[in-house]
């Protein structure tokens, strides 16, 4: 069972990660611009571009799965 502290920490982590990737979720960005932005955000925050890519992928997978569930 998750404690309130654990849930709060998870929510804070999710919010921090979303704030990092939010600019990268713009569908109008071409891949080159998205890569350039990812590298800049990663450098500014002391994390790797690969980590940001994983955050993006997890977010997109989560949102796609939840949209699918609402349809059916």
Image (cartoon, rainbow, N blue to C red):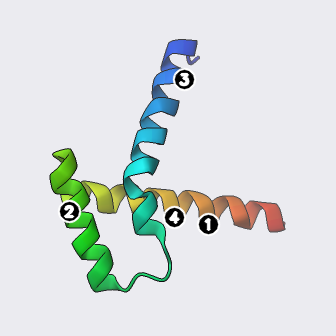
Determine the image quadrant of residue 31: bottom left
Quarter of the image with the C terminus is bottom right
Q: Secondary structure at mark 3?
A: helix
How far from the left and from the top, in percent, is residue 40?
20, 62
Could you say which is closer to the camera, residue 66 or residue 25?
Answer: 25
Task: Find the distance from the CA under tag 3 to the CA under tag 2.
Answer: 30 Å
Task: Find the distance from the CA under tag 4 to the CA under tag 1.
Answer: 6 Å
Q: Residue furthest right?
A: 72
Among numbered discs 2 and 1, the one appearing first in the sequence: 2
Task: Find the distance from the CA under tag 4 to the CA under tag 2.
Answer: 21 Å
Q: Residues within 10 Å of mark 4 (few under 14, many from 20)?
A: few
Which residue bears the numbered disc 4?
Answer: 60
Among numbered discs 3 and 1, the one appearing first in the sequence: 3
Q: Secondary structure at mark 2?
A: helix
Which residue bears the numbered disc 2?
Answer: 40
Number of labelled discs? 4
Which residue bears the numbered disc 1?
Answer: 64
Task: Find the distance from the CA under tag 3 to the CA under tag 4.
Answer: 21 Å
Are the residues flagged by discs 4 and 1 in contact, CB closer than 8 Å?
yes
Which residue lies at the image location 16% right of the left edge and 45% below the top edge?
Answer: 46
The nearer-to-camera label among 2 and 1 is 2
- For residue 7, the mark is 3
Residue 61 visible, this angle: yes
The nearer-to-camera label among 3 and 2 is 2
Q: Secondary structure at mark 1?
A: helix
How far from the left and from the top, in percent, is residue 29?
41, 81
Determine the image quadrant of residue 56: bottom left
Are the residues flagged by discs 2 and 1 in contact, CB closer than 8 Å?
no
Among numbered discs 3 and 4, the one appearing first in the sequence: 3
């Amino acid at each position: 069972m998750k404690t309130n502290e654990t849930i709060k920490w998870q929510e804070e982590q999710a919010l921090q990660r979303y704030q990092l990737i939010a600019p990268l979720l713009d569908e109008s960005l071409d891949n080159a611009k998205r890569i350039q932005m990812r590298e800049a955000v990663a450098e500014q925050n002391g994390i790797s571009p690969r980590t940001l890519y994983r955050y993006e992928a997890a977010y997109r997978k989560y949102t796609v799965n939840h949209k699918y569930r609402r349809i059916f």
